């Protein structure tokens, strides 16, 4: 198969990003879209010159038709993955599925089982497995340069404004609207740790809470909206400062501003901040997403890892330290430093261009790598080209669910 045909289901930030990358790769064509928001639907229809018969305002309308494409890019919100995934699998579509697979294990199993029963390929968008950084770290570990891997310390610095955008004001602010923060944000990190360690996790513990973004923390004089707040200029979480500064920067207009408004003008941003969720004071939202969480994991054979996820950082690349019996690796996302204990020397490995791990920049090459792998797998009918298939993705999701149970119950949770 030369040119994979794609239907975009959910043409929001992520759906449009994957569609653009797929077409830019020269290996795919977008032939259909399902999206309820008229501006987004029209943008995709126009950009890919879609036949009007292949433009739908709901995934169910597309699924009511015989199969129109080889694969779907399924990028609806977290709680809207199960039904379309099961329906499109049954119709014979291969599926590029945004993470998390689904909020609960039963729902995720329903998707995985549907894909297996239909014999279609399923790639979960754990984009970190596909970055040049990860390839280089895996090459060091797999070559045995660190000896036996004993422990990993990993930090996901979400970033103060990014956290306020997505987890205080935005889609992922409440577990009942989306998923717990750990699943929404750090399923990537727990999946990445599993990929690097290469052993099954056996038990986890976790602590974390909503420390800061709640009513009692508001500075004196704060009002419910940034546009009218007298203390807004001195607030680190000012929505005015964040979103107006995105205007005239195409990358930032796409993200984070694209979640706030589809119209990048001063008037549209002002209206969105006056009326919509993104103009709310961070101390007066309806959020419950924890703003800091630590997870400790024990893997088979006694290997350990600790993960810290925090809102209270600059938005930066993940930081990782890997400790082995013969060496030590330290990565800040741009440079990997490898220390050899025998020679007491250090090698510095430059990760190269495109290390910016933000969503706007395609997760440091991860988005592009994932799309390439998925298209190659579909073209060659070879699911082994996908690094984030159903089995490994379900296994790392299980660690996330166990960690969240550990946090909520204050216990150490064993993983089946
Ligand atoms: N892999 C990553 O790193 C990464 C990053 C951000 C978000 N995500 C995940 O991607 C998914 C989408 O996130 P997003 O930021 O693009 O959200 P978004 O809200 O921008 O996009 C979702 C789209 O789905 C559309 N939609 C709603 N109901 C629909 C229906 N019935 N049929 C078809 N489309 C429908 C919405 O109108 C919206 O345009 C989420 O699951 C999210 O957690 C993954």
Image (cartoon, grey):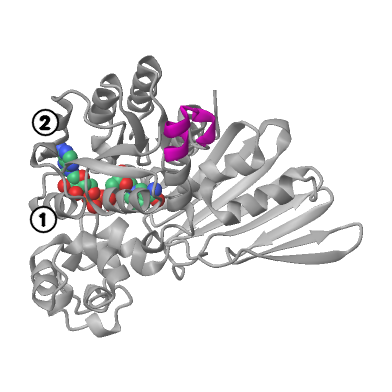
Instruction: Give the quarter of the figure containing the N terminus.
Output: top left
Q: Which residue is mark 2?
A: 61
- Residue 127, numbered label: none
What x and y, as percent, mark residue 360?
36, 63
Looking at this view, is 401 or 134 the one in front? Answer: 134
Looking at this view, is 296 or 135 the one in front? Answer: 135
What are the residue bounds of the magenta stretch?
374-386
| Element type at mark 2 | helix
- Marks 2 and 1 sit apart, C-alpha to C-alpha, by 18 Å
What x and y, as percent, mark residue 328?
76, 56
Q: Check whether the beta carbons of the residues at disc 2 and disc 1 lie within 8 A of each other.
A: no
What x and y, as percent, mark residue 349?
70, 64
Looking at this view, is 154 or 111 the one in front? Answer: 111
Q: Is residue 189 left or right of residue 241?
A: right
- In the rendered image, the vertical position of residue 156 relative to residue 356, given as above or below: above
Label 1 packing within 10 angstroms: few (<14), some (14-19), many (20+) = few
Q: Which residue is mark 1?
A: 39
Instruction: Tell me if I can see residue 171 in this picture.
Output: no
Instruction: Tell me if I can see residue 46 in this picture.
Output: yes
- In the rendered image, the vertical position of residue 330 relative to residue 184, given as above or below: below
Q: Mark 2 or mark 1: which comes first in sequence?
A: 1
């Amino acid at each position: 198969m030369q040119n994979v045909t794609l239907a975009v289901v959910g043409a929001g930030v992520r759906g449009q990003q994957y569609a653009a990358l797929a077409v830019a790769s020269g290996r795919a064509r977008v032939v259909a879209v399902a999206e309820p928001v008229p501006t987004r639907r029209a943008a995709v229809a126009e950009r890919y010159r879609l036949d009007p018969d292949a433009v739908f305002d709901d995934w169910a309308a597309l699924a009511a038709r015989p199969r129109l494409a080889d694969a779907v890019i399924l990028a609806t919100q977290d709680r809207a993955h199960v039904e379309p995934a099961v329906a499109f699998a049954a119709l014979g579509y291969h599926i590029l599925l945004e993470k998390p697979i689904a909020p609960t294990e039963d729902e995720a199993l329903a998707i995985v089982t549907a894909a297996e029963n239909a014999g279609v390929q399923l790639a979960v968008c754990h984009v970190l497995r596909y970055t040049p950084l990860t390839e280089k770290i895996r090459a060091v570990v797999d070559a045995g340069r660190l000896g036996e891997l004993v422990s990993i310390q990993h930090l996901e610095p979400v970033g103060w404004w990014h956290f306020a955008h997505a987890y205080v004001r935005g889609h992922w602010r409440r577990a009942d609207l989306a998923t717990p923060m750990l699943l929404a944000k750090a399923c990537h990190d727990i999946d990445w740790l599993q990929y690097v360690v290469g052993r099954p996790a056996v038990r986890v513990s976790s602590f974390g809470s909503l420390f800061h973004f709640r009513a009692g923390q508001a500075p004196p004089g704060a009002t419910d909206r940034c546009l009218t707040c007298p203390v807004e200029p001195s607030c680190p979480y000012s929505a005015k400062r964040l979103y107006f500064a995105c205007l005239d920067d195409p990358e930032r207009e796409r993200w984070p501003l694209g979640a706030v408004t589809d119209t990048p003008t001063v008037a549209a941003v002002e209206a969105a901040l006056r009326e919509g969720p993104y103009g709310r004071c961070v101390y007066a939202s309806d959020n419950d997403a924890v703003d800091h969480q630590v997870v400790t994991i024990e893997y088979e054979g006694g290997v350990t890892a600790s993960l810290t996820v925090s809102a209270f950082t600059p938005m930066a690349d993940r930081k990782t330290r890997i400790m082995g019996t013969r060496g030590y690796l330290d990565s800040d996302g741009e440079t990997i430093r490898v220390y050899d204990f025998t020679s007491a020397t250090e090698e510095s490995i430059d990760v190269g261009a495109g290390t910016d791990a933000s969503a706007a920049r395609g997760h440091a090459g991860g988005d592009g790598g994932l799309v390439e792998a998925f298209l190659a797998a579909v073209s060659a009918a070879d699911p082994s080209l996908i690094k984030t298939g159903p089995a490994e993705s379900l296994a790392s999701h299980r660690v996330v669910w166990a960690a969240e149970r550990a946090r909520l119950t204050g216990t150490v949770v064993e993983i089946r």
